[in-house]
């Protein structure tokens, strides 16, 4: 990697962690014409916790895609990881915007989440492209299930958060499908279990911190 590329990747990392990113697409809007319902303090706090978790997920996604892109020599895969990461930048921006609207802050542990995901992405990349794609597919499938659970938990009146999460869910599952079509292998059950356990620890922590 050239010095210029190294600087670009480092700059990207700083922008993600410091929240200096902008969406390329408008924030998803609710399909109903009904105005958003007023949320109680408890509903607002719960929605904020869930959206903070989703924001952390997007922080991790940026680190994973960045490290996986750097781990492969395939130009095709580098492009695929870049395109997926760009959609995730939109997700990151949308969830940050919604947190602000809910008078809430992002996770104070974002630098730690980013560093951990970066290391995991590099580790996945060391097992080859098919394993790296398999890791991407399994990650996105688990994220899709996680977002489905959030759609069940979000207050019915929080149409703004629900619209964002719905769009994110659909695109995460599309990423999983794409990774499989590009040759991603099915990961062993113990690996999938460890991934799910780590995800659960992250979500429970990020909900509060």
Image (cartoon, grey):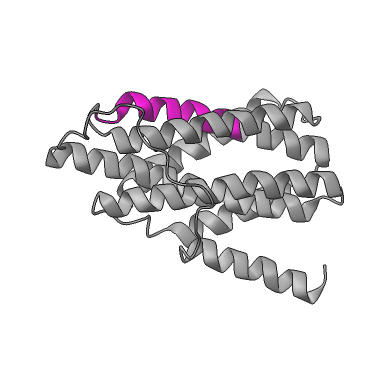
Which residue shows up at 25% across the image and 39% down it? 46
Q: Decide if residue 140 is on the left or right side of residue 154.
A: right
Q: 30 and 61: which one is in front?
A: 30
- Residue 167 position in % (x across, y down): 47, 33
In the rendered image, which quarter is residue 134 located in? top right
Which residue shows up at 74% across the image and 52% down it? 69
Visible residue check, residue 103: yes
In the rendered image, which quarter is residue 105 located in? bottom left
Which residue shows up at 40% across the image and 47% down it? 95
Q: Is residue 153 magenta?
A: yes
Tell me the chief SS of the magenta region: helix
Q: 139 and 180: which one is in front?
A: 180
Image quadrant where one finds the N terminus: bottom right
In the displayed structure, 58 sits above or below 130; it is: below
Q: 155 and 138: which one is in front?
A: 155
- Residue 108 position in % (x across, y down): 37, 60
In the rendered image, which quarter is residue 127 located in? top right
Q: 28 and 100: which one is in front?
A: 28
- Residue 109 position in % (x across, y down): 42, 58
> For the view shown, which residue lies furthest in the bottom direction?
3
- Residue 172 position in % (x across, y down): 57, 34
Q: Is residue 46 magenta?
A: no
Visible residue check, residue 194: no
Q: Which residues are magenta?
A: 140-155
Q: Decide if residue 1 is on the left or right side of residue 19.
A: right
In the displayed structure, 165 sits above or below 104; it is: above
> For the view shown, which residue lies furthest in the front direction?
33
């Amino acid at each position: 990697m050239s010095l210029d590329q190294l600087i670009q990747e480092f700059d990207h990392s700083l922008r993600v962690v410091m929240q200096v990113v902008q969406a390329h697409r408008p924030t998803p809007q609710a399909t109903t014409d009904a105005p958003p319902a007023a949320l109680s303090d408890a509903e607002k706090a719960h929605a904020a916790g869930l959206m903070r978790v989703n924001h952390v997920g997007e922080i991790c996604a940026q680190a994973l895609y960045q490290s996986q892109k750097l781990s492969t020599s395939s130009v095709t895969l580098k492009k695929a990881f870049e395109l997926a990461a760009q959609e995730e930048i939109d997700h990151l921006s949308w969830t940050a915007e919604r947190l602000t609207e809910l008078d809430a802050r992002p996770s104070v542990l974002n630098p730690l989440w980013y560093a951990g995901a970066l290391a995991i992405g590099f580790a996945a990349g060391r097992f080859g492209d098919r394993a790296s794609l398999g890791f991407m597919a399994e990650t996105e499938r688990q994220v899709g299930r996680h977002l489905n659970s959030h759609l069940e938990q979000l207050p019915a009146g929080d149409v703004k958060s629900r619209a964002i999460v719905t769009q994110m869910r659909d695109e995460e599952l599309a990423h999983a499908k794409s990774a499989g079509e590009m040759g991603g292998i099915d990961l062993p059950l113990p690996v999938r279990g460890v991934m799910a356990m780590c995800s659960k620890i992250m979500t429970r922590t990020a909900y509060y911190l």
